[in-house]
Image (cartoon, helix red, strand yellow):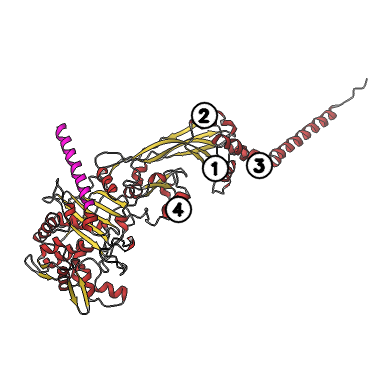
């Protein structure tokens, strides 16, 4: 019997099976890697880590008495990761969030450096919107609900130029390593205290790292670093004084700066008109921004630091100090004022047409006689006036940390030759001696100047934080008796019957001060001096600088009213109102402290 051998056949069959299996495997690999490669690559990338930066709550800003000026309010925002979000879901999401689908698609389709950077779709979600989204989480891969914190400015426009506002990160800031850990939709300080103390207030951002699946669902929290709240800061501002100052400027354009003479602490800083920083906290709209910037009154201009105007008769203080120190006059030196001073073919008029008669220094300051200072300025010369003005902080920045400060201008012979290519004329010295002509100062400079006169001649850098170490910029080389002569005369400006600052006289404290009326050079000749129908743009500017109490000053103040007319009638009452508000507030605090003790 013959047995048939089939071993080789089986081997062949097995070989065929192996070959076919390899072919099938290769085809499957080809399908997965070539035909469906992009799809599975996307799915693979979707099973990855999601890193979410969490912005820290900002520190609270308080006034000097512990009153909060801002608060933080949490709210929900809807953000999307474009690389994970299916654009076909825009219609469904738009119905939940009640915003056009085109708006959602437009935000998602904007070209960005990374498709995995979150973008904000809607802020301030209602609880209904949040609950609906959470219930349908799997329907919207790449959609994330986050908690953001809004900055609310409790007093609105009051103190806005000092406190500042928050704004979105600018493109340049996004590239700055200092801000790299912040969420792209974060808001940072862009103005005032919010800007210059942003790092302190901002705190340290936190971070959450999740593992997510292909649908964008969070599988598990892998790591969490809680954010660290920013430090609180206490400003030197007195909000009650600030409110009184803002109220005093209702309907007016100008500025007010109040300082503590012995420290340089800013008690109040008003720039009118102001703006509402609350409009910036969620990103200001183009319409709102255009409405602000197109206003002729320029509410974004910080007039306390950035406006430069002739100081008018307040500058006579500098001329008087220079003349006393240089021995040109003493308290008994008299000049005769008949209403004008003649120089060649030019007449330089006094504000009082009939003149002041025989005038000594005290009377000249109290009644603000122009002719007296014309004569004294002529004897001094512009270079000596320049020298003393600079000593008292005029013509240079005060150094306050709020930004955008301007220097003003104190001219001299060298300046005119360098800028005008012309010699200096005596007539220019005459008008400069009363704060006209090329002379210009800022309200904050004038507050520093009057502070130095009351504190014994120390120039302090204005500071905005309470209990900051005083920053003396220099001690003025002026005799104490000279400063006393000036202070006594300034008390007379307010207290004496013919003083130009009687409108500042107070029943609760003694106030010393100096009025100033800065002429607007372009005033039309067709308007008489006392005409009530002078257009506003032709009206004089009003100044008043002051200190109180007279025996030992606790507050020094500078008030400027743009096109306000006479300093004695327009600016002096504002100074009185603010000084009294401060003194009454201080008295209440002292009484409260006594009761507690």
Q: Considering the numbered disc 1 on the image, is that residue within a helix, a strand or a loop?
A: loop
Name the quadrant containing residue 427.
bottom left
**Which comes before the other along the chain, label 4 or label 3?**
3
Residue 382 seen: no
Spatial CA distance of label 2 from label 3 is 34 Å
Q: Considering the numbered disc 2 on the image, is that residue within a helix, a strand or a loop?
A: helix
| Chain part drawn in magenta | 573-597
Q: Position of residue 492 (x, y in %)?
A: 12, 57
Quadrant occupied by the C terminus: top left
Q: Position of residue 577 (x, y in %)?
A: 22, 48
Nearer the observer, disc 4 or disc 1? Answer: 4
Q: Residues within 10 Å of mark 4 (few under 14, many from 20)?
A: few
The residue identified by callout 4 is 290
The residue identified by callout 2 is 131
**Which comes before the other along the chain, label 2 or label 3?**
3
Q: Viewed as shown, does residue 357 lie left or right of 259?
A: left
């Amino acid at each position: 019997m013959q047995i048939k051998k089939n071993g080789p056949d089986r081997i062949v069959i097995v070989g065929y099976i192996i070959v076919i299996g390899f072919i099938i495997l290769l085809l499957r690999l080809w399908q997965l890697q070539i035909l469906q490669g992009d799809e599975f690559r996307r799915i693979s990338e979707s099973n990855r880590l999601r890193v979410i930066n969490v912005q820290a709550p900002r520190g609270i800003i308080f006034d000097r008495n512990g009153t909060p000026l801002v608060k933080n309010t949490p709210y929900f925002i809807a953000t999307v990761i474009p690389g994970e979000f299916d654009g076909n879901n825009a219609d469904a999401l738009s119905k939940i969030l009640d915003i056009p689908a085109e708006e959602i698609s437009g935000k998602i389709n904007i070209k960005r450096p990374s498709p995995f950077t979150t973008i904000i779709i809607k802020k301030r979600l209602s609880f209904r919107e949040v609950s609906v989204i959470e219930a349908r989480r799997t329907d919207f891969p790449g959609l994330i609900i986050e908690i953001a914190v809004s900055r609310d400015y409790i007093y609105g426009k009051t103190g806005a130029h000092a406190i500042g506002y928050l704004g979105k990160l600018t493109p340049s800031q996004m590239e700055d390593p200092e801000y790299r850990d912040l969420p792209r939709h974060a808001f940072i300080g862009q103005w005032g205290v919010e800007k210059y103390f942003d790092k302190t207030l901002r705190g340290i951002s936190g971070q959450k790292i999740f593992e997510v699946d292909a649908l964008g669902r969070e599988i598990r929290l892998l790591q969490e670093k809680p954010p660290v709240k920013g430090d609180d800061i206490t400003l030197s501002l007195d909000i009650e004084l600030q409110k009184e100052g803002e109220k005093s400027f209702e309907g007016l354009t100008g500025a007010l700066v109040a300082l503590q003479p012995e420290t340089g602490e800013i008690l109040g800083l008003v720039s009118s008109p102001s703006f509402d920083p609350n409009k910036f906290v969620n990103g200001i709209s183009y319409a709102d921004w255009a409405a602000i910037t197109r206003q002729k009154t320029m509410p974004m201009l910080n007039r306390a630091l950035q406006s430069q105007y002739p100081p008018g008769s307040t500058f006579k203080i500098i001329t008087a100090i220079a003349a006393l120190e240089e021995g040109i006059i003493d308290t008994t030196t008299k000049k005769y004022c008949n209403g004008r001073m003649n120089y060649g073919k030019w007449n330089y008029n006094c504000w009082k047409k009939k003149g002041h008669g025989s005038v000594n220094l005290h009377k000249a300051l109290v009644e603000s006689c122009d002719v007296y200072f014309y004569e004294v300025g002529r004897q001094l010369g512009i270079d000596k006036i320049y020298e003393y003005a600079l000593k008292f902080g005029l013509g240079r920045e005060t150094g306050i940390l709020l930004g955008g400060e301007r220097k003003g201008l104190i001219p001299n012979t060298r300046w005119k030759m360098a800028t005008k290519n012309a010699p200096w004329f005596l007539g220019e010295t005459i008008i400069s001696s009363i704060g006209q002509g090329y002379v210009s100062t800022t309200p904050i400079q004038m507050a520093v100047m009057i502070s130095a006169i009351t504190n014994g001649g120390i120039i302090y850098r204005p500071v905005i934080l309470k209990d900051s170490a005083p920053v003396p910029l220099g001690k003025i080389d002026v005799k104490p008796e000279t400063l006393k002569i000036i202070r006594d005369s300034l008390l007379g400006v307010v207290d004496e019957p013919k003083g130009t600052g009687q409108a500042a006289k107070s029943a609760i404290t003694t106030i010393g001060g100096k009025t100033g009326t800065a002429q607007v050079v372009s005033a039309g000749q067709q308007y008489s001096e006392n005409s009530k129908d002078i257009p506003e743009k032709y009206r004089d500017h009003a100044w008043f600088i002051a200190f109180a109490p007279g025996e030992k000053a606790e507050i020094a103040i500078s008030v400027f009213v743009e096109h306000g007319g006479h300093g004695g009638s327009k600016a002096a009452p504002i100074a009185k109102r603010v000084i009294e508000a401060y003194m009454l507030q201080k008295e209440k605090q002292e009484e409260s402290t006594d009761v507690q003790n």
